[in-house]
Every structure is written in structure tokens, then in C-alpha cells.
Amino acid sequence: MTTEELKALTVAKSVDARGTACPGPLLEAKKAIGTINSNDVMEILSADEGTKVDIPKWCGKQGHEYLGAVEENGYFKVYMKKK
Amino acid sequence: MESTNTITVEKLQAELESLKAKTTRLENSRKDQLSVAIVSGDMDKILAAMIISLAAAAMDTQVKLFFSFWALSALRDPKKKAKGKDFISKMFGMMLPNGRNKLKLSNMNMCGMGPMMIKRLMKKQNVMSLDAMFKEAAELGIEITVCEMSMNLMGFKKEEMIDYPHLRYAGATTFVADAGESSMQWFI
């Protein structure tokens, strides 16, 4: 997905994990995924660059769909869809 | 023509049955499980073990940690005291770090300056403290097994170990059995 498409997504849940380093963002994402429905889009905000690589791996294992990442000023927004 | 077809189906069925049996066996021997034997009591190594364990647990991998020898220092609760220790046990208790916040670094310890600096850096970089990591581990159901033999050897007692919901006491056999059915087995 392009940056514009990602930014236009309706996000069911936004997880702000900017205050924690690895593996904090993954733990936050795991906690939040239980609160949304199937096919809902979730975004994870992280200042940890590794999150961009880690979240796709997590999605791959759990069967969620990784949509892409957008770089903001000093952090990243990682988008995924729950299976 | 008809008869060759039946034979093929039967053959296929037999093949399928044997494959099913094989996959069941493989699934049981390679569970989505991580077994780690932690022997080191160095702060950096305990940190590494906890970070990897948390990442694995967040990916829904069952995590089983086996703490033994020097690593047991990390499981001591500084607020608890055990009575009835003999002289050597008391000496060991005094000389070894009392709890996860008193651990030393394997490198650059510099009489405690190193750990202090690392802890300050971790805070600055928003890395979870060991306290926070143990709390998360408890919530994620990470199992901790205390090696009973090494606990006795080092003169530690059950009464001085931390309160942790998934703590149990066992021997090397338990680790070997757990590790045998895990897809990942490590030694730290």
C-alpha cells in the first residue's frame, strides 16, 4: 500500500508505544489485538526502528495482514489488519 | 480401468494415514515452545534472556525458563529472609547478589558503576527495567523453574525466592523433558 492509502485507512485502534523500546511495542500490540474485531485495522506508533521489521514477522506468524509503515517525525506508524 | 482406480485410491489412503501419523509425531516433538536454561547471573545475560522470552511470549510461543546456579541470584527477593542456614550458606548468601536489581555486568562492571550506568541508559532509552520485565512475564504466562539441586547447593531457600505466579521447583530432568518437545532450546 502507498503512504497515501495507509494514511487514508480507518483505524479501529491506535497503539501508542513510543514510550517503550523493544520488546515493548510488540507487547503493547499483543495486548491491543485482543480488543479489536477481525478485519479491523490497527496502527502501532513506535519510536523504535526495529518495530518496522518485527511487526511484519509477528503478523506473519499469527496470520494477521501487515499493511505497511509510514514514517512520521521521529517515529513510525505501522499498520496491520487482524485476521 | 475401474480396478486400477480403486487401487490408486487405496494406496493414497494408506499414504495419507502414514503421513498423518508422521505429522502428529512431529507436531508433538516440535511444539511452538521455547526452553531456556539460564545459568549465568550476569545482569546483561538475564536481560537478554528476559527480552527474548517476552518477544517469544508475545508471539504466542510457550516459554519455559529453567534457572540454575548463578542465575538463581536473580530470583532472590531482597525483602525476604530465610532462617536456619548453616555458616557456608550464610556466606554464599552474603557474597551473591541479593535480587535482580543487584546483579553485576559480565563486562565493564567497574565495582557497580557499570550496572548503574546501564540502568540509567535503559531508563533514558525507554527500555523496560528487569522489574517491569518480570511483571510482563508473569502476565504472559512465562514459566520459571528453579533448579532445586543448585538452589540447595548455593544455600538458598524457597522462602527467599520471589513471588511469581508461575514458579515451580524441579530438576534437570524437567528441563530435558521440556526442551525435548520445544522447537527452540537455548542455554544462557
Image: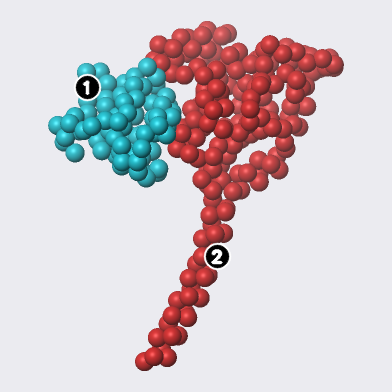
Chain colours: A cyan, B red
Asked if residue A78 shows in the view, the reply is: no
Rendered view: A18 above or below B16: above
The chain ID associated with circle 2 is B
Q: Nearer the viewer, residue A47 or A34?
A: A34
Q: Secondary structure at mark 2?
A: helix
Asked if residue B40 shows in the view, the reply is: yes
Place residue A64 in its image quadrant.
Answer: top left
The chain ID associated with circle 1 is A
Residue beneath label 1, please? Answer: A72
Rendered view: A1 above or below B46: below
Place residue B124 in its image quadrant.
Answer: top left
**Left or right position of A30 against B156:** left
Q: Nearer the viewer, residue A44 or A76?
A: A44
Residue beneath label 2, please? Answer: B21
| Quadrant (top left, top right, bottom left, bottom right) of the N terminus of chain A | top left
**Left or right position of A56 against B159:** left
The residue under label 1 is which amino acid type? Glu
Report the disc number at residue B90: none
Q: Nearer the viewer, residue B188 or A4?
A: A4
Name the residue at 53% across, 70% down: B18
Q: Residues within 10 Å of mark 1 (few under 14, many from 20)?
A: few
The residue under label 2 is which amino acid type? Ala
Q: Position of residue B23 (x, y in %)?
A: 51, 60
| Quadrant (top left, top right, bottom left, bottom right) of the C terminus of chain A | top left
Place residue B39 in its image quadrant.
Answer: top right
Q: Secondary structure at mark 1?
A: loop
Name the residue at 40% across, 43% down: A62
**Left or right position of A67 against A15:** left
Q: Position of residue A68 (x, y in %)?
A: 24, 35
Q: How many marks?
A: 2
Tell me whether the residue at label 1 lies in contact with that at label 2, contact meaning CB atoms closer than 8 angstroms. no
